[in-house]
Image (cartoon, rainbow, N blue to C red):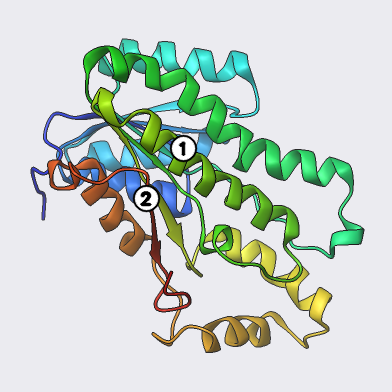
Amino acid sequence: MSGTRLEGRSAVITGGGRGIGRAIAEAFAREGARVVVAARTEAQIEAVAEGIRRTGGEAHPVSVDVTSDDSVTALVSQARDLLGPVEVLVHAAGVYRPNRFLDYTMGDWEEIVGVNLLGTVRVVRAFVPDMVARGWGRVIPIASTAGKYGSVLQSAYNASKHGVVGLTRCLGLELASTGVTVNAICPGFVRTEMIDEALPRMAELIGADDVAQVEAALVSRVPLGRLLEPDEVAHLAVYLASPESEAMTGQSLTISGGLIVA
């Protein structure tokens, strides 16, 4: 069923080729938004955009590397050409590399922080000026429950996501008077390709027999008793992009099946 909560809105979703980003792009299109689906892997974003168009939505694939100033500048220019002024930005691009703290290389830190935190900074800096000039905008970084608590074997990821949560608080305050709101989403364990790719390494790190054992251990921590689905996170993103969230800014909203309650 299609809705109208985002009718006519223009939106850019980074990390839109798979997982949570893909689900958000599809959900926005179902609610009437015109979307740019952005990520590094062209085949993925082209498939997402084509799927949206087949169902009657408007979607455009644009390749981007969020660690590159030039690439992000090009994304802004192309998005303007395709959609006009961009009103909603979702930054879902991210990387996850579980490891022991002493086994992370500085290159690992630079990659993880570079995409997850500095990528957020770079993309938001590029899109927010137009929103401020127009007096309206929605910025929705995808953080993580890992940005709200400590855990073993993912210090780089947690640190990067703590940074996104802190950035959201600061920007929410700083931009509140401009008509631009900034609210992050902090998902818990979501059934995505990112989790699937990390499970073998997690099994190796904890000495588990197989990935099924690791997944069962993750699920056991969730009071809801299951992993979340990307569409469930996308519903929250639709709310944050819609007029219904007008009075909310600077928040980092947890959706985790009860994994954490902060």
User: CB under 8 Å between callouts 2 and 1?
Assistant: no
Element under disc 2: loop
Amino acid type indicated by mark 1: Cys
Quadrant showing the N terminus? bottom left
Amino acid type indicated by mark 2: Gln
Q: Write down the quadrant of residue 163 in the picture.
A: top right
Q: Considering depth in this image, is 101 or 196 the residue closer to the camera?
A: 101
State left or right for residue 207 relative to residue 128.
right
Q: Write down the quadrant of residue 85 in the picture.
A: top left
30 above or below 87?
below
Q: Write down the quadrant of residue 236 in the picture.
A: bottom left
Element under disc 1: helix
Q: Looking at the image, how many numbered discs can be counted on the residues?
A: 2
One can see residue 91 in this view: yes
Tell me what residue is drawn at x 41 percent, y 71 percent: 228
State left or right for residue 166 relative to residue 240.
right
Q: Choose the circle earlier in sequence order: 2 or 1.
A: 1
The percent position of residue 113, horizontal first and vertical second, equals 69, 42
The percent position of residue 137, horizontal first and vertical second, equals 27, 28
One can see residue 87 in this view: no
The percent position of residue 151, horizontal first and vertical second, equals 68, 70
Q: Label 2 to label 1, Cα distance in Å?
A: 10 Å
Q: Which residue is mark 2?
A: 251
Q: Which residue is mark 1?
A: 170
54 above or below 11?
below
Tell me what residue is drawn at x 30 percent, y 32 percent: 176
Quadrant showing the C terminus? bottom left
Tell me what residue is drawn at x 33 percent, y 14 percent: 130
243 above or below 153?
above
Tell me what residue is drawn at x 59 percent, y 51 percent: 161
